[in-house]
Image (cartoon, helix red, strand yellow):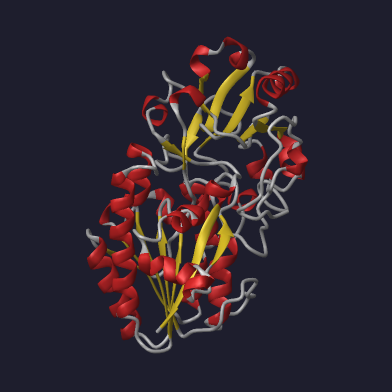
Amino acid sequence: MSFAPSDGYDAFEILDPAAAPAPPYGSGSLCDLLPSVAAGLGVPGFTATLPIAPADRVVVFLVDGLGWELLLRHPEYAPFLSSLAGSSMGGTGRPLTAGFPSTTATSLASVGTGTPPGLHGLAGYTVAVPGADYLMNQLRWQPHTDPQAWQPYPTVFEQTQRAGVATAQVSSPLFAQTPLTRVALSGGSFLGRTTGEERMDLAASWLAEHDRALVYTYVSELDGAGHRFGVDSDEWRMTLDAVDRLARRLAEQLPPRSAMYVTADHGMIDIAPEDRIDFDEDWELGAGVALLGGEGRARHVYAVPGAAADVHTVWSEVLGDRMWVATRDEAIAAGWFGPTVDERVYHRIGDVVAAARDDIAITASRNEPGESAMIGLHGSMTPVEQFVPLLEVRG
């Protein structure tokens, strides 16, 4: 099921998780981008499910936190990107869906592997380790878990490199050896550069130096500004302006027979203090809960043995008119994590999964002090979080 950015909601309904706007995996989500690019590069085994014309040299520029709706709201701070996005300005851009949950670790794995979360298994910001009594943070990879066992699927980058396409990731040197890079973005050459300008220049030169090439590059500052200051802040808007100049810088250096795609991993929404429920102070929501995973707007709730049904009942009664509250099996059947879920992934998903529809967040002031202090949040399936851009420039 997909939905349009302008869709409205009935504010008083009790939400049916089967009616939640599950991402259209296989036809319009982030996991479809690189397979479609690889098909255009002539890599065997890939099929283009997105309307992407073939190119010999492709660069994918992923801007952390650049939601489609946020971009459309601020054309004055992103004139170049906005010109690519809106048909009224001559652009042919379109939105993709990030996947659920709409969070960085999940989305980067979807991009890099070309598979939905139910297969690659990075099914949330934090998830329970099956058979253990603790959570794993999949962005920071804490506590450490064997990356290959956790995510065994090959990346699209690995497959394009094997097919003779010069492949590279141009990103911060800090990400060169991280487990998340290994499971989601490995393959070809990792080229570390500190500044965005250096990354844009190196990505363009790599394309020019190779007859067939795939380059991925990334900036994180917009996401950081949104978390710290909110997306309705001058700091966020000024960072968007800087990102727009980086995108233009890269586009202006594209060599012949090349294509540039700008996308993102999720959008973001500001949640006011009065719209936050502190799980650590709420005895009702905490009853029967062994572990609280995920993040404020996309929660994995793990029950103590025998309490899953009661936890689902309570969370539905307390939050069911503002969040889609599903059992694990209901969320899987509704396609939240993709058409199928691997057995190894099944118990990483909460006994109860709660995804925000309204302006609400379930925070945890004691156990997640840093995350609870963030102004801008993401994770759920609302348009502002879920829709990300797919913008194209041809060299």
Residue 223, horizontal then vertical, whole percent: 38, 47
Q: Could you tell me if residue 129 is visible in this image?
A: no
Q: Is residue 330 above or below residue 339?
A: above
Q: Residue at x 54, y 41 (%)?
A: 124
Q: Left or right of 17: which side holds 217? A: left
Q: Is residue 162 above or below residue 111?
A: below
Q: Could you tell me if residue 272 is visible in this image?
A: yes
Q: Residue at x 31, y 77 (%)?
A: 204
Q: Residue at x 60, y 65 (%)?
A: 32
* Count of all numbered marks drawn on residues in the image: 0
- Which quadrant, please, contains the C terminus? bottom left
Residue 231 or residue 212, whichever sits in front: 231
Residue 3 or residue 342, whichever sits in front: 3
Q: Residue at x 53, y 72 (%)?
A: 87
Q: Is residue 5 above or below residue 101?
A: below
Image quarter of residue 208: bottom left
Q: Is residue 14 above or below residue 141?
A: above
Residue 14, horizontal then vertical, whole percent: 75, 29
Residue 283, horizontal then vertical, whole percent: 58, 10
Image quarter of residue 39: bottom right
Q: Left or right of 18: which side holds 188? A: left
Residue 326, horizontal then vertical, whole percent: 71, 33
Residue 226 or residue 353, whichever sits in front: 226
